[in-house]
Image: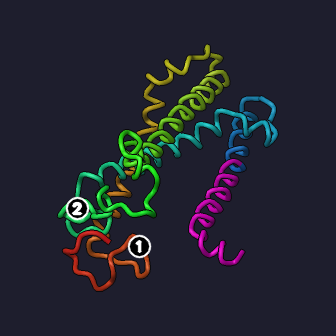
Amino acid sequence: MRRWLRGHALSIAMLGAFVIFWVLQSVFGWRVHNEELTLYGRHALSYLEYLRTGHLAEATFENWESEFLQMGGYVLLTAYLVQRGSSESKPEQGDRPDDQVENATSGSPWPVHVGGWVLTVYRNSLSIALLMIFAGSFLGHLFGGVANYNEEQLLQSGAEPISAWQFLGTSDFWFQSMQNWQSEFLAVAALILLSIVLRQHGSPESKPVTSSHATTGA
């Protein structure tokens, strides 16, 4: 067990942090939502009732959406674009030898040996998976957002609910998206540029401490 935990420690730590922070988000969001309901003379929700609200869905998927857009876009862009001196960039001379099918070994994944469209999909499977999660999160944000928007409008003015399609055309929806999208790409740009001259000993995201600033790739 100790060996297994050591071999999977990074993913365990990341997923553990995700669960802890999402639970805390839901608890504080529940309190905020109930304060708003009380302000308008409505009864407070139980925690389990809150978990089914658009308030939580919107807040959750709004952030997932931007994260997976950033990650999927970053994986795609780094396949074609380079940044001289950055540890986040592939070498300027082109693709890695291990990316060439003729260098496959018996231990290579099975799609490499099958070839054809199976290999084409596999060659792009990481970006496809990330962008599919982005698409699902975008829809979660849209439907959670319209549910929360309609509830707020009902509380404040008794206005008629709108459809998800109508909410998609509102400035409110796109303001929520853009404020997260811009911050995600700024963070990635900072990592790309800072990794040219700064180091983190022992991290695969950093170039070795002794590497020159002009060295591209970790």
SS at mark 1 in the image: loop
Q: Quadrant of residue 161?
A: top right
Nearer-N-terminus badge (2/1) = 2
**Picture coordinates of residue 93, whole percent (x, y):** 17, 64
Q: Residues within 10 Å of mark 1 (few under 14, many from 20)?
A: few
**Picture coordinates of residue 67, whole percent (x, y):** 47, 49
Q: Residues within 10 Å of mark 2 (few under 14, many from 20)?
A: some
- Amino acid of disc 1: Pro
Identify residue for label 2: 83
**Picture coordinates of residue 188, whole percent (x, y):** 36, 57
Measured in 3D between alpha carbons, the distance from the residue under mark 2 to the one under mark 1, in whole angstroms, is 17 Å
Work out whether residue 41 or residue 8 is closer to the camera in this orientation and state it: 8
Q: Which mark is residue 204?
A: 1
Q: Is residue 188 magenta?
A: no
Q: How many marks?
A: 2
**Picture coordinates of residue 83, whole percent (x, y):** 22, 61
Magenta residue span: 1-26
Work out whether residue 46 or residue 48 is closer to the camera in this orientation and state it: 48
- Amino acid of disc 2: Gln
The residue shown at (62%, 62%) is: 17
Position of the C terminus by quadrant: bottom left
Position of the N terminus by quadrant: bottom right
Work out whether residue 160 or residue 69 is closer to the camera in this orientation and state it: 69
The residue shown at (57%, 26%) is: 146
The residue shown at (62%, 59%) is: 15
